Image (tube, helix red, strand yellow):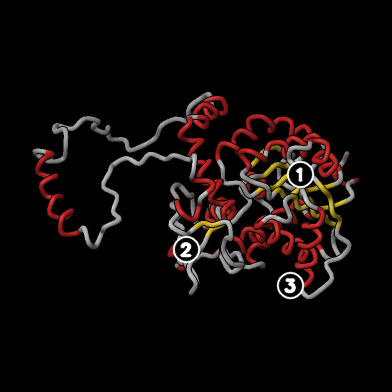
Amino acid sequence: MATSDKEFAIVVFGASGFTGQFVVREVAKNCKGKFKWAVAGRSKDKLEKVLQETASELGQYVGDVGVMVANCSDEASLSTMCSSAKIVLNCVGPYRFYGEPVVKAAVENGCHHLDISGEPEFLETMQHKYHDKAVCAGVHVVGTCGFDSIPADMGVVFTQESFPGELCHLESFLTLHSGPKGSKGHYGTYQSIIYGIASDREGNLKKLRKELFPTPMPKFGPKLARRDEASLSTMCSSAKIVLNCVGPYRFYGEPVVKAAVENGCHHLDISGEPEHPKFFSCGFFSHEGPTREQAGYVATPICMVQAAMVILEETLPNSGGVLTPAAAFTGTSLIDRLNENGVMFSVLSCKESEK
């Protein structure tokens, strides 16, 4: 089915989840009077409650919003959802466990798919399995459309466009500022981090990348040959000298740095960590999650929804595929749209342009 024949422009899947509720509010602000949209998830009652809360928070009627029951374990329900939507905003994670059925249904039903995953194994598995199929279907499957990814990826595009010359090297830094009540993270984010680390430890990603990129990238570096061997086994005459220096620090510093990690290796056991985020993260992550003022959970829906609006209102520079945000949205108005909605891109200093 062509995307122009779909009943809904956007369907928010996982709309009653923690992040999904924020996405629903952002869609309501952007789609009212322009596009018909819907929410989807496992519980109709919870979905209707989210719509009521959204209308109350925005202080306005959110319009005639569709409500669809869909479940990652029910292939038929996913097919029905994707066949009725131009774009699915997938907010159901961890994507390692729940993401592929939605991507599969989207590609098979000619539906664009955006998610907010930050899980390398899932993202690269989808690229490996569905890129060619997505190109043939003319749909865009774009992962990492959240706060932790779009600003970084599109930031490279912005820097390249703003730089007065040929950009050869770029460094990226992230600084987070918490409010007066501190910072918190949600359980879902914690799960994605834990299973992302587990995937790397299991070696899945290394195997996958060998299949994705069978030909290694050429090595580059300084023209002068690097000396790969040292004359001494350590950067001192004896390792005991270093240990003797550390000893007094350990003794006198113990009351101050009681929680310092002395071991050079930490074994990650994920058997209990996903179910007890508050304990294992020293209170940072919890099932309750952060307040609505937390930057990541405010900016993520802005990034995701503005990416969707670009797909709906513009012609993308490629015919489809499983892509990163920069690959999908370079040459579009996404950066301008983000600036207009509070996710700002700006040049702080550029000496060459000031001359």
Q: Amino acid at mark 1?
A: His
- Crowd around label 2: few <14 · some 14–19 · many ≥20 (10 Å): few
Residue under circle 1? Answer: 112
Q: Quadrant of the C terminus?
A: bottom left
Q: Secondary structure at mark 1?
A: strand
Q: Residue at x 22, y 61 (%)?
A: 255
Residue under circle 3? Answer: 57
Front of the two marks 1 and 2: 2
**Above or below — where is 232 with respect to 95?**
above
**Residue 89: image location, x then y, percent:** 73, 50
**Above or below — where is 187 with respect to 237?**
below
Q: Residue at x 67, y 45 (%)?
A: 328
- Crowd around label 3: few <14 · some 14–19 · many ≥20 (10 Å): few
**Residue 309: image location, x then y, percent:** 75, 56
Q: From the viewer's perspective, is 36 left or right of 247?
A: right
Residue under circle 2? Answer: 176
Occupied quadrant, residue 138: top right
Q: Secondary structure at mark 3?
A: helix
